């Protein structure tokens, strides 16, 4: 097949670009200097997202990595530790920032296939008040994780356990609204207000939450860290030290604010498209499909030289204008606002053609954004 002039990018929802309407809002944004806290767009965004998620205050960040870093260093001091999943983004995929910059020790625990940490393991990992040990201060969870949604009852139980032991709780909610869409859908609801209500129910369990605007919500950049006013005051100082102080950034804040108003409910479309892709791949010999909960479908190649064959598969798909992400023997397919049913149909057809004689299975992968 000849290369297509139209490229469909399924590598990540971080590849989204601002819509025309979002660009217009950005172009007309009133600007100030956020270094003096007088950029009106930033101030309005921070107030909006804090109120939306039920917190006293919020802080606009350039990235989710910096948001998680500022959160951990605001909760913990040198010699403290945080409990975290062994494949969690803030442990595996953020350069070890908390340890490098804050001398905060991670205590990784094995994650189950759905991203949960055993409650017994969490309890056992909390150190006694003894000078031989780092001081356990924080439990960090992630929702969604590899496209899977942490069960709400589990979130309640895990954070209640941590709080009872005197720990704070932080949520890496880079895809919080994907989790909220799924959670609201379990009750047969999908309106904007229903999704926001589901998001607040999740965030109510945590002392701080980081939420990303530049993935499924489609803004070009930015995350927000939410918490109490005292917590955000500490995070503000750390953000400055980490180089996250910004100036005339209201155009980016305007994009994030637009995304909160217009791109939350449309996440239901991404989830539906992921299910369409999964449905289209059913019936292939050697392929087992796990029902996608949100906007990710994962394939694992089995057999000899699986990693090499997966890398070759990515190249063959790219030659057809279909961009995907390989991680060893794993192939990740992510839906978002810049891919549509036409692209999904082409992807399924190409995969069925290329894999019709292969042996594949779908399972819970390691994470990479």
Image: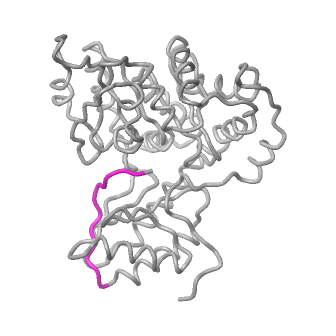
Q: Is residue 194 magenta?
A: no
Camera-side residue of 283 and 165: 165
Q: Position of residue 66 (x, y in %)?
A: 51, 34
Q: Quadrant of residue 58?
A: top right
Task: Give the magenta part as a residue range.
Answer: 357-368
Camera-side residue of 344 and 187: 344
Which residue shows up at 41% across the image and 62% down it? 332
Q: Position of residue 311 (x, y in %)?
A: 38, 72
Q: Position of residue 28 (x, y in %)?
A: 84, 40
Q: Quadrant of residue 300?
A: bottom left
Q: Main secondary structure of the magenta part?
A: loop
Q: Is residue 360 magenta?
A: yes
Tell whether 250 sits left or right of 240.
right
Which residue shows up at 30% across the image and 43% down it? 115
Tell whether 107 sits left or right of 168.
left
Which residue shows up at 58% across the image and 27% down it? 52
Q: Height in image: 368 above or below 245?
A: below
Q: Position of residue 179 (x, y in %)?
A: 44, 41
Q: Height in image: 324 above or below 157?
A: below
């Amino acid at each position: 097949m000849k290369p297509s002039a139209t490229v469909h990018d399924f590598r990540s929802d971080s590849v989204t670009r601002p819509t025309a309407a979002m660009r217009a809002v950005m172009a007309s944004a009133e600007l100030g200097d956020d270094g003096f806290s007088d950029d009106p767009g930033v101030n309005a965004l921070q107030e909006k997202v804090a109120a939306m998620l039920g917190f006293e205050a919020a802080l606009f960040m350039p990235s989710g990595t910096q948001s998680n870093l500022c959160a951990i260093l605001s909760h913990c001091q040198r010699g403290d530790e945080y409990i975290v999943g062994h494949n969690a983004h803030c442990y595996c995929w953020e350069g070890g920032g908390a340890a490098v910059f804050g001398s905060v020790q991670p205590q990784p625990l094995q994650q189950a296939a759905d991203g949960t940490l055993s409650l017994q393991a969490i309890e056992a990992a909390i150190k006694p008040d003894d000078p031989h040990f780092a001081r356990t201060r924080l439990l960090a969870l992630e929702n969604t994780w590899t496209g899977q949604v942490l069960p709400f009852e589990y979130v309640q139980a895990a954070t209640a356990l941590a709080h009872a032991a005197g720990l704070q709780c932080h949520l890496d909610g880079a895809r919080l609204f994907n989790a909220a869409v799924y959670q609201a859908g379990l009750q047969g609801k999908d309106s904007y207000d229903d999704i926001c209500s589901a998001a607040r129910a999740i965030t109510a369990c945590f002392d701080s939450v980081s939420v990303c605007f530049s993935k499924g919500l489609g803004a070009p950049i930015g995350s927000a860290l939410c918490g109490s006013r005292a917590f955000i005051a500490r995070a503000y100082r750390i953000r400055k030290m980490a180089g996250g102080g910004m100036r005339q950034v209201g155009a980016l804040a305007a994009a994030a604010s637009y995304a909160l108003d217009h791109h939350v409910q449309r996440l239901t479309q991404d989830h539906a498209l992921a299910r369409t892709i999964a449905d289209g791949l059913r019936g292939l010999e050697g392929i087992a499909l796990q029902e996608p909960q949100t906007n990710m479908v994962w394939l694992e190649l089995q057999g000899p030289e699986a990693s090499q064959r997966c890398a070759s598969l990515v190249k063959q798909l790219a030659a057809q204008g279909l961009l995907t992400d390989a991680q060893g023997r794993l192939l990740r397919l992510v839906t978002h606002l810049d891919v549509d049913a036409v692209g999904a149909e082409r992807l399924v057809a190409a995969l069925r053609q290329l894999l019709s004689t292969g042996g594949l299975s779908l399972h819970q992968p390691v994470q990479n954004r």
